[in-house]
Image (tube, helix red, strand yellow):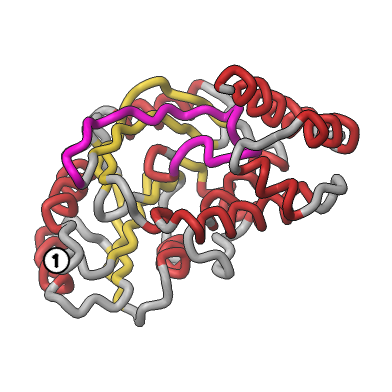
Amino acid sequence: MISIITPCLNIITDGREEYFHKMMDGVHLQVFTDIEHIVVDNGSIDGTIGILKDYQKKGWINRLVSEEKRGIYPAMNRGLQLVQGDYINIMNTDDYFIDLDFLNDAVDLFSKNKIDFIHADRIIKSRTGEPDFIKRGNERQAFFRMPFRHQTMIVKKEIFDDIGLFDESYRVCSDYKWVLQILLVGKIGYYLPKTVVCSLDGGASFNRLKCIEEVTKILFECYGEKYGLTIEDCQNIYLRRISDALFLKITTNIKNKKIVDSLTYCYEQEKLER
């Protein structure tokens, strides 16, 4: 069984109701049907609860939890505490599956490969009429920016059991810390080169300054401090401002090949773009 977790807050006033219905269709019209859908409402006050209860009556929401507003990661964690499935996906209210074979493909890949999670591509739809574009999963980017998004990931439940829940001290980038944690302990991913999700641009991580602050701290916490990098070094890594001096420091200090390879990729790509 696959458990889908959807954190939810004020989809009507935030202009996400249309996408919420698309999300529900994308989940429940999948070829793979052994699905548990858990929705955690984070204190909606605009009529969202009525929409959720209608879907619950329809049988499309298996567990509906209502709690006070605490943030997106506490809502995700509440859902994770309730899951019964073997695999987990976290789907936001303004994202939706466009590949109705994705869950079926994922289960098949898990059965044939020794892997811990699957990730794929997504298409980003602009709120302001800009052209859509595709964001491809790329694990080589992992140690300087988010390599893939949780909406495109199917993860074995046991990985959450091993690593733990999302760190609620972060407000917008805790999922990035969790991805770094699973990669640093050697969990094995599988990249499926298909566009499986459509996302509305923006979202929780749209606050650029907050994103810079949190990712900088995450890089420092997950590997920077261990290998003698400063907070400023970590911010420059995230902003892709790796100078020759910082690159020398990285290759001299860091003993983890995965991290060095990722930051070398960043450094070389940045040089090409100069």
Q: Is residue 84 visible?
A: no
In the picture, the quarter occupied by the C terminus is top right
The x, y position of residue 240, in whole percent, is: 61, 36
In this picture, residue 224 sits left or right of residue 208: right
The x, y position of residue 8, in whole percent, is: 28, 65
Say which residue label 1 marks: 12
- Residue nearest the viewer, comparing 269 with 215: 269
Q: Who's the residue at 70% across and 48% down the image?
A: 234
The x, y position of residue 118, in whole percent, is: 47, 32
Q: Is residue 187 visible?
A: yes
Q: Secondary structure at mark 1?
A: loop
Q: Locate residue 263: give its quadrant.
A: top right
Q: Is residue 135 magenta?
A: yes
Q: Locate residue 139: give its quadrant.
A: top right
Is 234 located above or below residue 52 in the figure? above
Q: Who's the residue at 56% across and 53% down the image?
A: 212
The x, y position of residue 226, in whole percent, is: 84, 50
In this picture, residue 104 sits left or right of residue 88: left
Total number of numbered labels?
1
Highlighted magenta segment, given as a residue range? 128-149
In the picture, the quarter occupied by the N terminus is top left
Q: Main secondary structure of the magenta part?
A: loop
Q: Who's the residue at 16% across and 68% down the image?
A: 13
- Taking the view exactly as shown, the residue that stands out farthest to the right is 252
Q: Is residue 15 magenta?
A: no
Is 247 located above or below residue 78 in the figure? above
Q: Disc 1 residue type?
A: Ile
Q: Who's the residue at 18% across and 57% down the image?
A: 16
Q: Locate residue 87: give its quadrant.
A: top left
